[in-house]
Image (cartoon, coloured by chain):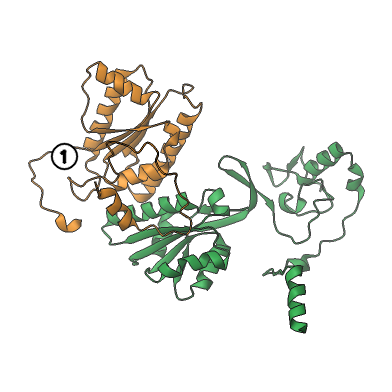
């Protein structure tokens, strides 16, 4: 894809891409509330709904950065409020570990954060979204994103399959990075 | 289970310096359970290596594969189709797996990504402790299921020594005295008379390296075949 790199116009200001992994029960509901309250927040935030913040995984977070996200945050319930009792505690641990992995690579760990956003806190959702976008703006573009317009990996499914296939065991199967990227780029 | 930890990224990065095509090969058994070299850890390491290369502006391809076990030839054969395409294979198996992989593909550079620690158990999430040192002559029947060879700093078979300090070892307060544990356990089992038994000196000659073992059933069969 590097052959398509065209010199970008300098006048265009840097607009960060921020990925927010939000838990269904608290943060995503707070996002809904922020919408109902007609609150305005940074349009740079792409919300990914996950069942519980405990679902988040170092692999997913690293992939978001590898695919060019400028900042990523995981938003879950307050301590003690998790629908699954301890999912948010696990997420805090995963985020801290992934920050260590980012430090090892040489990427700023501040690009990744965990937030508690209770379901009733619409304004807080908007505040956190602005805060993270502002932070990404200060840190500058993610050096892993080769072009400003580069599409992030991952398929956007308008109509998700109601019966998705069960994950298969991948033992003994070669996973080529190139092929996986190509697969995720096809619409 | 064999417990291992991943080497620092710096060190792995140093091993693959100047190489363009890397295959990260994981092992789906012990090191997958201790979160050091299974499928997920392979994905993390491969992603880290790719991102590191991109940040430094180096051309590098990193692909991933995880096999069920790297200590069995059958599973290593699954890599045969692919290893030729890579400059080096970074194995996230224990020391045994890395060696067996290097032996199976002896014209390939095989690099270790883990430090192998010990044979141990999972104490809790993310915590492991050593429980066996493979001394080849198990005496757990005499000691209430607690291994003095592993837990005692002096490997004492007839303990405790004078250094026992309210259940802790003189070597450090963070270590339990194996023989206090054994005494308490035998007391609970009503077998304190075992404490009076004198264990003969340990035969360390059986511990000579490298260990070899063949199952009797196979030995018998081989002998029969030889006769015929």
Chain B palette colour: green
Say whether residue A90 is left or right of residue B96.
left
Point 31% across, 38% down: residue: A111
* Relative depth, front residue between A160 and B41: A160
**Quarter of the figure with residue A138:** top left
Say whether residue B162 is left or right of residue B129.
right
User: Residue B154, percent across and down?
Assistant: 75, 54
User: Residue A110, percent across and down?
Assistant: 33, 37
**Quarter of the figure with residue B137:** bottom right
User: Residue B81, percent across and down?
Assistant: 42, 69
Q: Which chain carries label 1?
A: A
**Residue A130 visible in the shown view:** yes
Q: Is residue B87 above or below residue B46?
A: below
Q: In this view, does A22 lie above or below B90?
A: above
Q: In this view, does B23 lie above or below A15?
A: below
Chain A palette colour: orange
Numbered label tally: 1
Callout 1 secondary element: loop
* Relative depth, front residue between B117 and B42: B42
Point 54% across, 62% down: residue: B70
Per the image, the residue denoted by label 1 is A14
Point 46% across, 24% down: residue: A82
Q: Quadrant of the N terminus of chain A?
A: bottom left
**Residue A144 visible in the shown view:** no
Q: In this view, does B212 lie above or below A22?
A: below
Say whether residue A22 is left or right of residue B171.
left
Mark 1 is surrounded, within 10 Å at the Cα level, by few (under 14), some (14 to 19) or many (20 or more) other residues, namely few
**Quarter of the figure with residue B88:** bottom left
User: Residue A7, percent across and down?
Assistant: 10, 52
Say whether residue A129 is left or right of residue B193.
left
């Amino acid at each position: 894809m590097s052959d398509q790199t065209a010199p970008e116009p300098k006048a265009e200001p840097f607009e960060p891409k921020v990925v927010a992994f939000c838990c269904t029960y608290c943060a995503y509901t707070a996002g809904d509330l922020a919408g109902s309250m007609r609150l305005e927040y940074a349009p740079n935030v792409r919300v990914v709904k996950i069942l519980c913040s405990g679902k988040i995984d170092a692999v997913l977070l690293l992939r978001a950065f590898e695919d060019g996200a400028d900042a990523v945050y995981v938003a879950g319930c307050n301590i003690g409020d998790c629908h699954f009792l301890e999912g948010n505690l696990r997420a805090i641990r995963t985020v801290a570990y992934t920050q260590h992995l980012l430090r090892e690579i040489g990427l700023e760990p501040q690009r990744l954060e965990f937030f508690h956003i209770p379901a009733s806190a619409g304004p807080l959702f908007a505040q956190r979204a602005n805060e993270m976008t502002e932070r990404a703006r200060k840190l500058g573009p993610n050096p892993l994103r080769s072009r400003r317009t580069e599409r992030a990996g991952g398929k956007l499914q308008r109509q998700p399959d109601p019966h998705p296939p069960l994950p298969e065991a991948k033992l003994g199967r070669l996973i080529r990075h190139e092929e996986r990227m190509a697969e995720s780029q096809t619409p | 289970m064999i417990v291992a930890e991943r080497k620092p990224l710096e060190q792995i990065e140093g091993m693959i310096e100047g190489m363009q095509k890397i295959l990260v090969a994981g092992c789906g058994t012990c090191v997958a359970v201790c979160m050091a070299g299974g499928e997920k850890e392979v994905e993390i390491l491969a992603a880290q290596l790719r991102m590191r290369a991109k940040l430094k502006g180096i051309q590098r391809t990193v692909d991933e594969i995880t096999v069920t076990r790297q200590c069995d030839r059958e599973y290593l054969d699954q890599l045969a189709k692919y290893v030729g395409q890579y400059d080096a294979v970074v194995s996230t198996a224990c020391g045994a797996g890395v060696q067996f992989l290097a032996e199976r593909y002896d014209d390939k550079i095989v690099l270790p990504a883990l430090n192998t620690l010990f044979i141990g158990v999972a104490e809790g999430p993310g915590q492991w402790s050593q429980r066996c040192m493979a001394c080849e002559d198990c005496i757990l029947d005499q000691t209430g299921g607690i291994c003095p060879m592993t837990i005692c700093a002096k490997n004492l078979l007839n303990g405790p020594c004078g250094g026992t300090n309210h259940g802790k070892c003189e070597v450090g307060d963070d270590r339990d005295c194996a023989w206090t544990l054994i005494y308490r356990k035998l007391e609970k089992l009503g077998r304190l008379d075992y404490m009076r038994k004198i264990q003969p000196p340990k035969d360390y000659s059986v511990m000579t390296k490298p260990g070899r073992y063949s199952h009797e059933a196979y030995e018998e069969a081989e002998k029969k075949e030889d006769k015929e």
